[in-house]
Image (cartoon, rainbow, N blue to C red):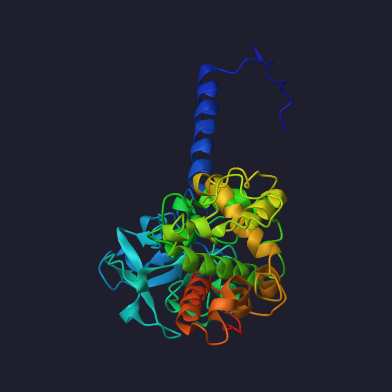
Amino acid sequence: MSTTRPRPARSARPSRLARARVLVGALLTAVLATLFVTTPASAADGQITGLAGKCVDVAGANSANGTAVQLYDCNGTNAQRWSNSGDGTLRALGKCLDVVDRSTADGAAVQLWDCTGGANQQWVVTAAHDIVNPTANKCLDVRDNNSANGTRLQIWTCTGGANQKWTAPASGGGGGTPSGFVVTEAQFNQMFPNRNSFYTYSGLTAALSAYPGFANTGSDTVKKQEAAAFLANVNHETGGLVYVVEQNTANYPTYCDWNQPYGCPAGQAAYYGRGPIQLSWNFNYKAAGDALGIDLLNNPWLVQNDSSVAWKTGLWYWNTQSGPGTMTPHNAMVNGAGFGQTIRSINGSLECDGRNPAQVQSRVDAYQRFTAILGVSPGGNLYC
């Protein structure tokens, strides 16, 4: 061992070369950190993640029609970047996620294909993290619950299993529900493709605070069934959310009951049907207005001029009135009486018990269509 004393440092300040080396090292560290950091799936990166944290992937990044769609390690490539624009499609590499041969059977594979607007290219990203093809009423599924790279994706009856749960991009209104409503804006638009611009989704969600138990009571399935039931009846009453006011103007003067102590201050013909459940009669305008804290008796026109007010009147009837039935439509759905009892409470005296089976069928058809969009079964007791 040398006994030579070490030469004292001339200065604590590092040399220019040392400082340069430190700077270069810091820059390299920052670059490497950027390159190798794992970014979680989100709407921003467009990934759809599922079983074992892996991604929905276009095999070989091949954009040819018929290319398999599979599960694969997330790698940030364009083969794993999906857009959800709100038109019901999921797109990657300029093409659509497609069910092979338009099949609705369990086990039908999915692929990439030119976007055609077909029902086999429609997908609904639900609040429960399912991706549902409404026509088949089946979920996007990882075959055999196998998380290995390259496992083919398919459609299968929705089971709630981990191999059917996905985190998908919500861009364009296709995924999240910031309002807390179980129906997304994309689903609402899918239900009412020809709706009048008056009936806005924002107007509906703004009205929810008036009846917080609506579509927010019971299991997720019950919540979705109630939302679908309400919207199905609304669909029937308004011709698909097309009509804001009653079309037969000859009926307008007939909705004033002068036996009421408050009369008809807005005029004999002012209380015609308006809004999603076509609120009519002076006593209904009075009762709804009192319940909602809005003077609808003196200003019934608010129901046709303010989307949120219109939706609130529909929710008022749904949650508080039994009409010709024996229960409110809300109670019918949350207590398991079934969709048929909502029809009875809304228009049972004219439609139920065989009086107008075609009208009942119209409501049932809409309800079944809407529950399919929401990815739930319609339940029993559909008819009245």
Taking the spot 72% from the left edge, 33% from the top edge, the residue there is: 1
Q: Where, quadrant-wise, is the C terminus in this rendering?
A: bottom right
Q: Is residue 247 above or below residue 332?
A: above
Q: Position of residue 305 (x, y in %)?
A: 50, 44
Q: Residue furthest front?
A: 259
Q: Is residue 309 left or right of residue 90?
A: right
Can residue 74 be seen?
no
Q: Position of residue 251 (x, y in %)?
A: 47, 61
Taking the spot 46% from the left edge, 54% from the top edge, the residue there is: 244
Can residue 354 be seen?
yes
Residue 353, located in which quarter of the rendered image?
A: bottom right
Closer to the camera in the image, 314 or 106: 314
Taking the spot 53% from the left edge, 73% from the top edge, the residue there is: 371
Closer to the camera in the image, 288 or 364: 288
Q: Position of residue 96 (x, y in %)?
A: 33, 65
Residue 342, located in which quarter of the rendered image?
A: bottom right
Looking at the image, how many numbered discs can be counted on the residues?
0
Q: Is residue 92 left or right of residue 291?
A: left
Q: Position of residue 382 (x, y in %)?
A: 57, 82
Closer to the camera in the image, 171 or 28: 171
Q: Is residue 222 above or below residue 22?
A: below
